[in-house]
Structure formats: C-alpha cells, structure tokens
Image (tube, grey):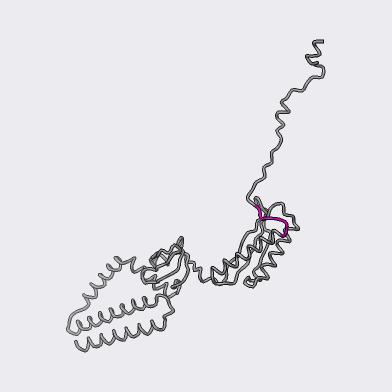
Amino acid sequence: MIVVVAIIWLLMLLNSWGERYLVGRRRSLSGSASALRLGRRVIDGIILFAGLLFTLSHFGVNVTAALAGLGVGGIAVALAAQKTLENIIAGVSLIADQAVRVGDFLNLGDIQGTVEEVGLRSTRIRTADRTVVSLPNGQIANMKLETLSARDRFWFHPMVNLRYETTPVQLNSVMAAIRNLLGEHARVDSASVRVRFVRFGVSSLDVDVFAYVSTHEWNNFLEIQEELLLGIMNIVQKAGTGIALPSQTLYIAGDTSRQLAQPIPDNNERPKADALH
C-alpha cells in the first residue's frame, strides 16, 4: 500500500508540474489555463482510479464486475450531463482553435462586445452598454462568429447621390475629383479606389465610391472617414451641383373632359336680345 500510494503521489506531482510548465509557455493563448486545469484533473482522476484498481486486484478482488457497473453508471452520467459535456467540449475546441480570445471585439448574432474571459463552460462578453453577457460555449460553436477586431483594413463605401439637374460635365468632374482625393490620401489604398456612376436613382444620380482605409483602430477610421466625406462635400459644391434630397416630381395633365362636355353653339341661333327687336 505504501508503494502504491507513493507512486500515485509522485505521478500527481509530475502532472501538476507539467501543468505549470505548459501554462507558463502558453500565457498568450486565451483560456489555456482552464483547459490545462481540466486536463490535469482528468489525469489525476485516472491515476487514482488506476491505483484503486491495482490495489483491489492485488488483494484478490475481481474488478471485472466493478468495471461493468462503472461503465453503465458512466453512460447514465453522460446522458444526464449532456449539455455540460457539450459546453466543455466546445470550450476546449474554441481554445484550441483560438477562435475566441480575450480582448477580441466580436459580433455574435445580435450581441456585439469585447471578450473578457473564455472559460470551459461559457464565455463572458462586455457589450457596448457595459453589461456582461455569458454565452455557453456550445451555443457559440454553432453561431456565426465575426471578429471585428481582426480587420486589417476598413471599408469606405459611401453612395454619393447627386441631383438630377447635374450635367454630364459636372458628373465627370465630381468623379475625377473624388478619385484624386482618395488616391492622394496617405491612409487610403490607392489600388482599391473605385468611383463609378452606377444608376439613375428614384430622385438622384447615384455615384458608388469604393476604397479601403489602412488602419486597425475604429476611432482612427472614423476620423479618416469624416475627413474624406467633408472633402467629397467640397468637391460637389465646387462642381456647381449638390446632394440630392428624397423628392418626387408630380406632373398634372390638363382635364379636357369638361371642354368636350360643353355644347357647341349654333351659328343660326340668335341671342334672345336680338329676338326682342
């Protein structure tokens, strides 16, 4: 018994040392501590169970029936804890694939926020309203996951709606000036710039502006976007045209039904005043 206990104790110490070593090497991996802690506990349980079986077998106890009973009990426990096991397996998968990391700004369905903690059962997200939402990992694994903070560039894509009074010369001038504005900007990818007249809208001439802004921060992109939009407004104003407002033109045709309904006077009929003479 002393030898068995010593071996079990030594194996558990080695398992604990291995966990600390792996956690020290994987500090940048979000949720690794939780996954490694779960793995250490599972291995400790296996070591204790193996030591117990070895001890019973050494003293002549038949462990076959015990193993069969444990197998049936394990199936019952697995069925009862199906959701918990699903969340744990999904959490290990998310941690291993690094699909969700602490500090990421995510868009999960109608939830948008920053990841604060990735656990084995659930993930905590801090929303823009400063509330904390805890989502089960099994649910996250089945959802469309959009990592907004992983963007390398931002999409600048406004639709410039010009008035229908804009002449073709003015339209070409506006598009050429917008191309120059985007192409000469230091933070805009000049290879992605596209400015095209795309359609005759309901109340405007629609010019599609397409470009990528090279930045990683949302606030910086908003600043650059504001600068570009103000530049487009100045270009439209200098061209002698303007931004169209949602409007409709109503054409009213003359009603000729009344004119047709009036009787045509007879030239042979004299007025009553003449008949009195």
Instruction: Return the residue nearer the eye: 170 or 54.
Output: 170
146 left or right of 226?
Answer: left
Tag count: 0
Q: Position of residue 170 (x, y in %)?
A: 74, 58
Q: Is residue 48 above or below residue 138?
A: below
Residue 73 falls in image quadrant: bottom left
- Residue toward you, 102 or 139: 102
Rendered residue at 34%/65% (across/down)? 83
Q: Residue at x 38, y 81 (%)?
A: 23
Q: Is residue 11 left or right of residue 128?
A: left
Picture quarter with the N terminus: bottom left
Query: Is residue 243 depicted above or below 130 in this figure?
Result: above
Judged by its main secondary structure, the magenta piece is: loop
Instruction: Give residue 88's position: percent from left, percent from top.
Output: 36, 70
Whether residue 243 is in magenta: the answer is yes
- Could you tell me which quadrant the C terminus lies in? top right
Q: Is residue 129 magenta?
A: no
Instruction: Residue 80: give x, y in percent of width and height.
Output: 29, 65
Query: Magenta span covers which residues?
Result: 238-244
Residue located farthest toward the bottom when viewing the structure as drawn: 3
Horizontal relation, residue 3 to residue 136: left or right: left
Residue 65 quadrant: bottom left
* Residue at 63% over, 59% down: 159
Instruction: Please identify the quarter of the rendering in which residue 86 is found.
Output: bottom left
Name the spot of residue 201 as percent of width and height, x first: 65, 52
